[in-house]
Amino acid sequence: MKLAFIGIGNVGFALAHNLQQCGHEVIIAHNNVRSESVLMAQNRNPAFLALPIQEAIDAAEVVFLATPFKLNEEILKPLDFGNKILVDCTNPVGPGISHGLQSKISGAEKIQEWAHNAKVAKAYTIYGFENLENSSFPNYGLKPVMLIAGNDTKSKELVASLNTDLGFETLDVGDLSQSLHLEHMTLLWVKMVRVNGHHPNFTWAYLQR
């Protein structure tokens, strides 16, 4: 599958690299294909292609958004997604690691507003990049869970298949408005790890009796 990544920092690279290793074709979407971030990513994985953002979207089957949230409106509004899946991997974080939109609406719903002709699915936000780099927990007889949300069932099914490639079990938590709760899970994880010094290599699991 052809996957485009808008944003190739810690989160974007971890996802892109592991999915490329699973056999997917990765395109870095950047309007300066010789930028430092693009060249660094290609140095780490020479299989990555790079195209201007709209060209990358046109060429891809699924687009990942892994940018600082404050940049998203400016990035997304000029783009035509042509009804393609846009996986929102971003989080609105405000002062003191608070919710950047005062918990009035999820960041994913704002992404859907700005990328009006995309099918937005929320995923890959509830952990830090460390667990996207390596999702294996060999001391346990189960996979970590990746919670996803979105309004389009088929889009979520496709994201679930990518989760499987990445070593995660999928739990669909409902429509896109549920992303607000996933973003609060992110804040919990970030406060535990980045502020309170908890070890980053931990995830949630879904245990069903």
Image (cartoon, grey):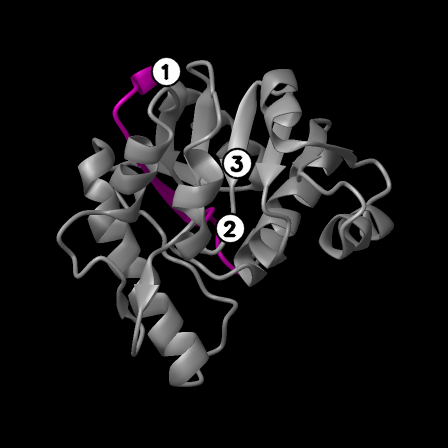
User: What is the x, y in percent for residue 117?
Assistant: 37, 19
Q: Quadrant of residue 51?
A: top right
User: Residue at position x 33%, y 64% from top?
Assistant: 93
**Which quadrant of the rendered structure holds the N terminus?**
top right
- Residue 135 visible in the picture: no
Q: Amino acid at mark 1?
A: Lys
Q: Amino acid at mark 3?
A: Phe
Q: CA distance from mark 1 to mark 2?
A: 24 Å
Q: Quadrant of residue 156?
A: top left
Eye-nearest disc, 1 or 3: 3
User: What is the x, y in percent for residue 46?
Assistant: 86, 41
User: What is the x, y in percent for residue 107?
Assistant: 29, 47
Specify the segment rendered in magenta.
Answer: 139-154
Residue 64: mark: 3
Tell which of 168 and 58 is nearer to you: 58
- Residue 185 visible in the picture: yes
Tell which of 197 and 11 is nearer to you: 11
Lower sequence index among marks 1 and 3: 3
- How many numbered tags mark residues here? 3
Residue 137: mark: none
Q: Amino acid at mark 2?
A: Thr
User: What is the x, y in percent for residue 177?
Assistant: 18, 38
**Secondary element at tag 3:** strand
**Secondary element at tag 2:** loop
**Which quadrant of the rendered structure holds the C terminus?**
top left
Determine whether, in the image, residue 64 is placed left or right of residue 121. Answer: right
Eye-nearest disc, 1 or 2: 2
* Circle 1 residues within 10 Å: few <14, some 14–19, many ≥20: few
Determine whether, in the image, residue 104 is placed left or right of residue 129. Answer: left
Residue 154: mark: 1
User: Residue at position x 28%, y 33% from top?
Assistant: 113
Lower sequence index among marks 1 and 2: 2
